[in-house]
Structures are given as C-alpha cells and as structure tokens.
Amino acid sequence: MAQALERNPEAARAMGAAGWEVAGHGRRWIDYRHVPEDTERDDVRRSVDTIQRLVGRRPVGWYTGRTSPNTRRLVVEEGGFLYDSDDYSDDLPFYVEAAGCPHLVVPYSLDVNDFKFLIVHGFTTADDMRTYLIDTFDTLHAEGVDRPRMMSVGMHGRIIGHPGRIRAIDGFLQHVARRGGAWLATREQIARHWLATHPPLPR
C-alpha cells in the first residue's frame, strides 16, 4: 500500500533497485465499498504517484483486494495499467470491458496463498504449504502439456517471512527447478505475454 511505502522510503527504493514489480495496492488497507468514489479515485492517483516517486517506476498492475463497484473502472480511467488482479474466478488471464474498452485481468489466488497460515484448517507448518504448492504445481504441470496453465502464489512478508515458514518457498522453488518446463514470471511479464499472444478480440 502506498502509505506503507511513504513510511518506509528506503524499502521502496530498494524494491526499485532490485527490479521488483511493484503493483498498486491501494493507498491504505480499507474496504472501498464504503468509500466515496471521488476518494477512491484520489487514492488510486496518489498511489500511482507515490510508487513512481519512491520506487522510480509507475505501477502497471493493480490489486485493491477490497474493491468497490467502481474500482476497475477508476483504474482503467486513471490509465497506464496493463492489468488488474482483483478477481479470483479463473486460473488464466481474461478480458473484461471496463470504461468502454477491453481490459486484461490476471487473476489472484486465495488458494495457493500464505494467508492460510492464519486461518483454521489452513497451513500449520512449512511442510503443509510446501506440499500443497508442489501438489498444485505438479497437477498444473501435467495439464500444461497441451494447454496454458498459470499458478499464482500469494505471499506476504509479514506472514511467510518467518524462519519456520520460509522453508515452504525454498522447497517449492527447488522442486520447480528440478521439474523444469515452467516459467517463473511477474504479473507484468504474464500480462505482456498475454496481451501479445492472446490479444482481445476486435470489437
């Protein structure tokens, strides 16, 4: 969130120096269903400005997480975005119409996500998450022989960033490297590939 970057400018500059993709994630972690449209529009604009100023590059992706009925339209109207990820309904990118034009959605996932460490019947140990990641990957890897497949892994520094949990990602990435045949990509890379390879149909 933009406000967090403002409070940690050194971290923001380090993200930029490392070449990370920093997507827009709202100004604050609030539920935009209860926010006036003009306020949400201003938060989108201020988030873009903050990321560009502190990270050194404007965001090309957006994920609010707690959207209003206006969020996608406001993001498209702001302009400069390749995609948003405010969707959980599919496993592959797809197009929707927003603000009168085709707009790419690269779905997010609450399934393969470290937040499951925080819920009952979710992940308890790193092995729980690692096993689930590997099982998901192996299934999609097999299905991907003759059709595109995408696995979106959700992680949060405050959740996965503990010594007893980070092993899950280490083990998963080692497994992916051994199996081969997968592209580890940012959402921006996925969006640019999809736009080039599967452009929206002519209107």
Image (spheres, rainbow, N blue to C red):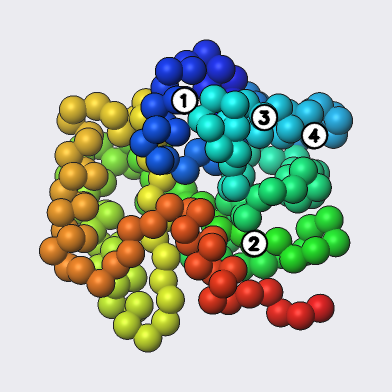
State the mark number for residue 104: 2
Q: CA distance from mark 3 to mark 2?
A: 22 Å
**Labels 1 & 3 near each other (Cβ < 8 A):** no
Q: Amino acid at mark 3?
A: Asp
What is the three-letter code of the residue carrying label 1? Ala
Q: Secondary structure at mark 1?
A: helix
x 60%, y 39%: residue: 58
Residue assigned mark 3: 49
Question: Which x, y percent locates residue 145?
Answer: 32, 82
For disc 1, the neighbor class at 10 Å (few under 14, some 14 to 19, many from 20) is many
Locate residue 4, reporting x and y percent.
53, 20
Distance between the alpha carbons at the discs numbered 2 and 1? 26 Å
Q: Nearer the viewer, residue 190 or 144?
A: 190
| Residue 85 seen from this side | yes
Q: Depth-wise, is mark 3 or mark 4 nearer the camera?
A: 3
Name the kind of residue labelled 4 in the image.
Arg
Instruction: Give the left or right position of residue 141, taking residue 194 as reference.
Output: left
User: Which of disc 4 and disc 3 is earlier in sequence?
Assistant: 4
The C terminus - image quarter: bottom right
Which residue is identified by label 1? 12
Amino acid identity at mark 2: Leu
Q: Nearer the viewer, residue 30 or 85?
A: 85
Which badge, 1 or 4, is on the more N-terminal residue? Answer: 1
Q: CA distance from mark 4 to mark 2?
A: 20 Å
Seen at 80% across and 34% down, the residue is: 41
Report if residue 34 is visible in the image. Answer: no
Q: Which residue is mark 4?
A: 41
**Label 4: few (<14), some (14–19) or many (≥20) C-alpha neighbours in 10 Å:** some
